[in-house]
Structure formats: structure tokens, C-alpha cells
Amino acid sequence: MALEFRNPAPDAGPDDGEEAIDYRDAYESLVQFLYQAPLGLVRLGPDGAVQMMTPAAAVLLNALPDGGGDLDNFFDALRGVAPQLPRLVADFRPPTGAVCTALRIPLAPSGADARWLGLTMRKLNARQLMAVIHDCTHEVEREQRRLRDRLIDASRTDALTGLPNRGVAIERIQQLADDRRDGPPHTFAVLFLNIDRFHQINDSLGHATGDEVLRLLAARLNAQLRRRLRAGGGSRADALATRIGNDEFVVVLDKLGRPDDVHAITQRLIDALLMPYGVGDQQLHVRVSVGVVLSAQASASGVEVLNDANIAMTESRRVGALGYAVFEPAMRDRAARRGLIEEELRHALARAELYVEYQPVVALDEPGRPLRCTGVEALVRWRHPRRGVVPPIEFIGIAEACGLIGELGRQVLATACADFMNWRREFGPRAPRVLAVNLSRAQLFLPDLVDMVRDTMCSTEIPPASLQLEVTESMAADDEQVRSVLTDLKALGLSLALDDFGTGYSSLSSLHRLPVDLVKIDRSFVSQVDSSDYHRVLVEATVQVARSLRLNTVAEGIETAEQARAVRLLGCEKGQGYLYARPLSSPALVAWLTAAAGDAPDADSDPA
Ligand code: C2E
Ligand code: MG
Ligand code: MG
């Protein structure tokens, strides 16, 4: 079959005055060029009958699975791989134009040996079409590679922050653990960062704000690490920031000079992340808890190292201080134990294994006067089926961490209010006047806390003035949100006590900013008030400042008559401690009250 191109202007002669162009030569060289080009040209009729075909086209069609048949009909030759061609042509109505452009036609087999043909077909007129075919295997391979890379990239990148994701973190840690095992010892560290109470940002300010905080935090993390790399040299892999979950970030640091470096770097990161985040017109503060695994303690598996870092993070959060915890193997046992307790606590709440004891608060009257009980403090206990009675210190923190504190707090408040109302019915004016119930920090961030307290007060009919909620210093310190919840609680008509005063963050100078009515001086001060000048001065100062703010004071943990005398002489109005009574079950308290009532004059008129 011969190629027959028509010279576009076969009779055209050279223009006057211009250099003569030999169009026949130009036409011949074009034909030669097209013959040699790796493009196959086929002219065909609307039924596919081949009218002309270049050798390159024949070579390309011969690569078809069955060799393209006898190549007399273009559609037949491609029927196995492009059966749609006859229909495409038949459906193409315009007198001329592109029927298809760069149509990809797979030539079997698939996989690594796959080959592809590109087909562009143009209708020239009612009787002729021109097809251009070329081998586009490399093109397709390139595209597929690009797509694959993009998919791999997407599967390794966190879409929200643009940071590498969990898979990359684990891979990098594994690599470092392997290097350390196989090569010369070097120091690396894995930092696990988790934003404290991040869900509250989402809940109260919306997910868009939460997302923005995550983006800003990620950018800040990256900026800090880049700064470190610029200062100390090294490649990006030496300080890798990743986002491995909702509000969880992991930083992998390699080539740490001295093990101590990690402490300085971690602290710098924490400080940087503590700076406020500008979202819209708000300035948001977030705190992160950080767990660190140093290479010396690192397991052989990347996943385990990450788990250990998470355990250390949880430990650091549990302690509650601003800072970080460095993983040590003993933490694994503690975490497992916490996991077990969490499971059991879930059951305990469902099976009503928790109960409440009450410790009397008494007036610190002149010696010789009968004991006056001014109030009681409700203290939760857990009657564990195997371990016996478990003290709150062993499960409150866990209940906070695993989200059970809301239900626990609700049960304690409901039980205590109901018991309190029973004593009132039984003892009338001689019953304790105030019921104090502890609130833990996590409870203050529950969205339904105020409603829950209000509902319980309504259903038990406890007079608001009889209920006192105890919060610890660290809760109330410098947290706008906490202060606003405390104000809402007070608006219910109840009173607030600042528990464990002296052990937390706030100082005497910040006492006036807290909406509390009473200060409970911590046992650690009371226990040494009669033996240490320092503690005596502190108790005295607390009482003075509280008095100037019209706050009452209670000395906690009084165990001896000497301590009672010392705190009374320093001006403390009330006391609580084993000297008067241990925490008692409700019936035991009734007995205690009965005995005390026997000696007492009239009911106490002094609000606790
Ligand atoms: P807290 O509120 O400061 O309660 C006082 C703790 O000191 C109680 O320990 C009490 O038994 C103990 N105590 C009282 N007098 C003495 C004494 O003379 N000597 C000694 N050594 N200890 C004395 P408990 O019941 O083990 O409670 C520990 C902490 O657990 C409480 O400290 C409180 O922070 C928390 N807690 C207890 N019940 C609840 C609760 O229902 N909810 C919450 N959120 N926390 C609770
Ligand atoms: Mg308390
Ligand atoms: Mg206390």
C-alpha cells in the first residue's frame, strides 16, 4: 500500500521576486519524514476499510495480540482491544472533525510488560478518516508512576496539617531502632505529644476552630524543628514532626549530641506550643502533655516505641504538671494496671460498687466545750469484690482519664445529697448543716456539670446553702474557663471550698481572684504546724489572708490535740481529722452524731 499525499498546491510556482521554492521537494521530504517517524498513519473509510497505511502503522498494529489480522480493515484489526471504534465513527455526525483524541488502547499483556497504543482519529470528509497511532507505553507508564507517587504521598501525609502521618513515624522509628541495633550506638528520642482536652475546643468552639488549632500547632512544631536543624545542621530526617492521630503528634529526633539535649529541646517545644493561638478574633491557649522515649530505653519495634511514648505521655498528664515524662519500663506495668482498673471501674459503676463515707468537720472551739459538727465531707470508696475497699486516690485519676468521672461524680453527689436529707429528717436542727462534695478537675470541663448539680439539688431537695463543692487549688488557678464554671455553680446558691490549699499553684496573693467561700488548709501543713515554724507561719498567713477576704478556714487532717490547739490559736475556725472522726459510713455517722448530740448544746448556727 502506498502513501499518496496530494501536493497542496502542485501547480503553484514561485512568487514574483522571491526565491523559488521547490514544493515537490518539500512534499517529498515531508512524506519521507512521516514514513520514518514513529507515528503510524492510516487513512480509512467510514467502515474501517484501510485505504492507506504507513509502515510504522503496520508495525504498531502487528504488535496486537493476534497481529492485527490482515490489516485490511482498521476496525477489525483493533476489534479485540478497541471494539468501540465503529460506533464512535458512526455516532460522529459533523462533516469533519476529531472523532477521538489520544485514545489509550491497551495492548495485552498487562502488568510489567503492558504496552499501550495512542489513537487520534479525524474525519476528513464523508468517505475518509485519518488515524494517527503511536506507541504511548512510556507516556502511560510515566503517568501511572506519577499517580502512584501521588497516592503513596497521600497515604503517607496527614491531609489536615500536611505533616507525615503515623505510618511514616513508625517507619522512621523502626529505622532508627534497627540502625542502633546494627550500627554504632547513637542517641535518638521519640516525643509523643497530646493536646489536653482537645475535644473541648471542638465541642465548644466547633470543629473548624479545632482544625485550625491543629494546623497552627503543626506549623509551630515544624518551625521549631527547622530552627533546630538550622542551628545544629543535619537533615530533615533528623528532626521529623508527624501527626499520628486526632490531636496526637510525634516528633522523632536523631543525632542528639548528649542525652541531655532532648530535655532542652522538649522543654523548648512545650514552651513554644504554650503560646496562644490566634484563631479568628480569639486567642486560644492549649496545653500539651508529652511522653519521651530515649533510645537507651527503646524497644526493637517501632510500634512498641510509639506505645511506650504514649504511656509516658499519659503518665505526664496524670501528674498534671506542665511538662513531660520520660519513659521507664515500670510505666508499662502501671499502665496495664490502670487499664485493668479502668475496666473494673466501668463495671463497678454499673453494679453500684462505689459508696460514700462522711467525715465530720467540727468547730475548733475552746477546749472543754462539747464537739460541734458543722458539716461533713463526702468521700467516695470502692468496695472491690477481690481487693476489698479501694481508696479514691487509686481510681479518681483513672476515672478522669477514661471519661468515667462524670458518672462517678453524679453517683456520689446523688447519694450524698440523699443521705444528707435523711440525717436532716432524723436529727432536725442537730444534723450537719453543710455537705461538702469533692469535684475533680475533669468534672469542671464536663459540659453538663452545672445542669447535673442543679438536677440533683432539685431531685433531692437539698437546700442550696447546705451544699458545698470542693475544688483543688490547681483547678481554680488562672484558668478563665474554670473560673466561669465555678461562677455558674455558685449562681445555683451553693458555696465553694478551696481544697488542699498550699499544695497547688495558686498563692495567697491570688486567693482573692477565686470565687470561693472557704479555704481548707492541706494536711501536709497542719501535720507540722506544732513542730515547724515554717508551717506555722504559713498556716497563720493563710488564715489572715482568708480572713481579710471574709473566707472561713478549715484545717484538714488534724490527728493530735496539739495540732488542734495550734491551728485554733492561729485563728482557724474549723477542723477535720482523725482526732475527731475518720470517714464514716452513713449509719456510723448517725451513731457518731447521736453520741456527739448527747453532749452538744444547741445546733450550730455558724455556716461552714
Ligand atoms: P480530700 O478532699 O482532701 O479529702 C481528705 C482526705 O484526707 C481523705 O482521704 C480523708 O480520709 C483524709 N483524712 C482526713 N483526715 C485525716 C487525718 O487526720 N489523717 C490522715 N492521714 N488523713 C486524713 P481519702 O478519702 O482517701 O480521699 C483522698 C482524696 O480523694 C480527697 O482528698 C479528694 O481529693 C479525693 N476524693 C475523695 N472522694 C472524692 C469524690 O467523691 N470525688 C472526687 N472527685 N474526689 C474525691
Ligand atoms: Mg476534699
Ligand atoms: Mg483536702
Image (cartoon, rainbow, N blue to C red):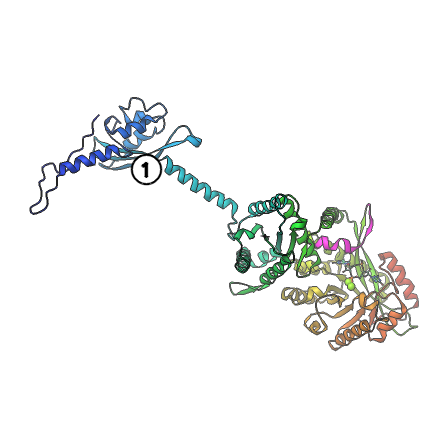
Q: Is residue 595 left or right of residue 557?
A: right
Residue at disc 1, secondary structure = strand
> Which quadrant is the C terminus positioned in?
bottom right
The answer to which image quadrant residue 375 occupies is bottom right
User: Eyeballing the image, is 23 above or below 189?
Assistant: above
User: Eyeballing the image, is 600 above or below 318?
Assistant: below
> Which quadrant is the N terminus positioned in?
top left
Q: Could you say which is closer to the camera, residue 25 or residue 268? A: 25
Mark 1, ligand 1, within 8 Å: the answer is: no
In the rendered structure, which segment of residues is drawn in magenta? 385-400
**Residue at image coords 51%, 48%:** 157
Q: Is residue 396 magenta?
A: yes
Q: Could you say which is closer to the camera, residue 387 or residue 9? A: 9
Q: Amino acid at mark 1?
A: Ala
Q: In the image as oriented, which residue stretches furthest toward the front?
A: 184
**Residue at image coords 86%, 71%:** 530
Q: Position of residue 214 (x, y in %)?
A: 55, 56
Say how many tags the image has. Answer: 1
Q: Position of residue 91 (x, y in %)?
A: 29, 33
Q: Is residue 103 left or right of residue 381?
A: left
Q: Position of residue 384 (x, y in %)?
A: 80, 48
Q: Is residue 542 magenta?
A: no
Q: Is residue 51 left or right of residue 295?
A: left
Asked whether residue 572 is in view, the answer is no
Q: For mark 1, what is the residue?
A: 102
Asked whether residue 560 is in view, the answer is yes
Q: Could you say which is closer to the camera, residue 331 or residue 263? A: 263
Decide: few, some or many residues near mark 1? Use Cα within 10 Å; few <14, some 14-19, many ≥20. some
The answer to which image quadrant residue 541 occupies is bottom right
Q: Position of residue 291 (x, y in %)?
A: 65, 54
Q: In the image as oriented, which residue stretches furthest toward the top?
A: 70
